[in-house]
Amino acid sequence: MNILVVDDERDVQTLFEQRFRREIRNGEFRFFFTFSGEEALSCLEKEDSEIVLILSDINMPGMSGLELLQSIRQTHPHSPPVVMMITAYGDEETHAQALELGANDFLTKPLNFGELKDKLKETL
Amino acid sequence: MSTTSFLIAFFFINYVRKAIQSEAKYPELDRLIVSVRYFTLGLFGMQFIFDDLDIFRLVWPAYLAFLVWTSHKREEFEPVRSTSLALLPYVAITLVGELIRMISTDFYHQYDAFFEAGKFFAFIWVFILWLNNRKQEKALEAERLKLEKQEELGRVTEEQRSQLEVLVAERTAELTLQKEELEKALNHLKATQNQLIHAEKMASLGELTAGIAHEIQNPLNFVNNFSEVSVELVEELREESQKPERDVELITDLLSDIEQNLQKIQHHGKRADSIVKGMLQHSRTSSGQKENVDLNAMADEYLRLAYHGLRAKDKTFNAKMVTELDPTLGKVNVLPQDLGRVLLNMLTNAFYAVSEKKRQQPQGYDPTVWIVTQSRPGQVIIRIRDNGTGMPDSVKQKIFQPFFTTKPTGQGTGLGLSLSYDIITKGHGGSLEVVTQEGTCTEFIIRLPR
């Protein structure tokens, strides 16, 4: 399963690679990393068919996670990937807005990787 | 005939009366003098009766001598004493003449002309002395009047002077009171200014808090995550090391991962640390001590703080942040707390401007804030640019004035830019310039000498 992670913090890549080291090693998950909404969109164009799940931070400079979500839902209405939003601000308003824009799930930082792992496996 | 003697006596008495001003000063004496005058008139009349009596001729000189003697006798006649002496030659020559006539009429008649001439000259002497005296008296009188006038003038001047002194004292008291009141007002203003500066600092700190919380949360999450994952890695390493056939490559991988994680933990720990330090520094009163500071790092840090500060208040807000930092900048000697406040203030303004524009025209607008550092010979330039609402000329001219703000009441103190201006110009000897175009962009240019 190809998963795209979008976060402006670059160390997220190292963290995911270590947290999911077993799953990556046995080929269960394959991660792609981009560090902005814009970068994520161009990545999606290239890896279009292969990305089945997107994990995106909301609070990023430039294009925000919500804008990215809106853009994905507009440009890929037929083969919709699963989109999970992650944010440090776990307020109701943002949560509602994310779900309204078509997010499949809403996670708050700090991430509980055990829970995330279960959710990913469930989706798979 | 003794008419001359009579006239002398009569006028002398009148003169004395006038000279000593007896009528006004010594009324009793005056009555006496008036009596003497009548007596003189009587004496004059009597001489017609006793004309043939030779001895009577001696009466006039005796009478005149008596008058002179009297004038020397009493205190009151002091002013006429010297004048009275003028009578003595006349008295003497008349007396001698009459005595000689009594002893030898022939001899007298033989030298009649001498005696008459002597009498005449003595009379002239009296007359001249009297004239001279009168002249002197007139001069004295004039002098006295002048003196009186001067005294009067002096008295008036003195009166005016004392009046003026009273006025001056009154005005001085008034002015002193005003000065004290002004000083009080000034002290009050100074205290208020300090309070306002403190309030402005606290307000900007409030803006910072949300940004800081976010900025600290991120590194803390990494610290937690990397340490948790490292525990897992160590566990895996232990399992692997207990196997009879160890996968050396895996062990090497695990060890290098653990090492990398520890470095990440340290990195993010330091990141949180520097943010907390920055916050403390910001709230602290300026030490007034310049320090060598990495301006690029400071610019980047404050850009993020300002961004997250605004984000925390308005969650829909977003903007692109662009840093163009000159790698040759090196360390710059600045007042870190003060300069930090300036940067925070300008960046907050920049983000505010782009968010306002985004609110007005949500479509097709790409809100962006730039922070640029440049190294130039002898100076360092920091540019803070935004493509926000810009400012009309009327606003641009007032932005550095204290209490000027375009924000709604309660949202800005109006002191940010005025304080920033003081910090850059007075605190650093630099310059602060603004370039703006209404509806398009704003750029603040800070120039610091190095």
Image: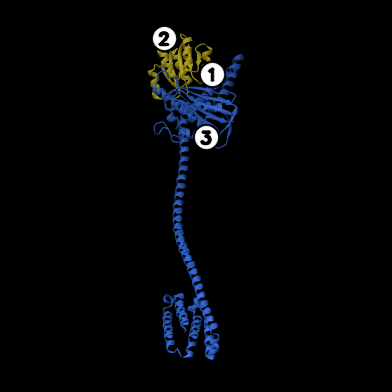
**What amino acid is labelled 2 in the image?**
Ser
| Pointer 1 chain | A
Task: Write down the residue under mark 3.
Answer: B423
Coordinates of residue B23 in the picture (x, y in percent): 42, 76
In the rendered view, would you say B24 is above or below B186? below
Looking at the rendered structure, the secondary structure element under dot 1 is: helix
Coordinates of residue B400 in the picture (x, y in percent): 47, 33
Camera-nearest label, 2 or 1: 2
In the picture provided, is B351 more to the left or to the right than B237?
A: left
> Do pointers 2 and 1 mark residues of a single chain?
yes
Corner quadrant of residue B333: top right
Front one among B13 and B199? B13
Identify the image's colour scheme: rainbow, by chain, secondary structure or one colour: by chain
Colour of chain B in the image: blue
Distance between the alpha carbons at the discs numbered 2 and 1: 29 Å
In the rendered view, would you say B345 is above or below A114? below
The yellow-coloured chain is labelled A
Front one among A30 and B444? B444
Looking at the rendered structure, the secondary structure element under dot 3 is: helix
Q: Which mark is residue B413?
A: none
Coordinates of residue B42 in the picture (x, y in percent): 41, 85
In the picture provided, is B412 more to the left or to the right than B116?
A: left
2 or 1: tag closer to the N-terminus: 1
In the rendered view, would you say B244 is above or below B433? above
Distance between the alpha carbons at the discs numbered 1 and 3: 42 Å
Task: Write down the residue under mark 1.
Answer: A14
Whether residue A8 is visible to the viewer of this picture, yes or no, is yes
Q: Residue at x 45, y 38 (%)?
A: B196
> Do pointers 1 and 3 mark residues of a single chain?
no
In the picture provided, is B277 more to the left or to the right than B439?
A: right
| Pointer 3 chain | B
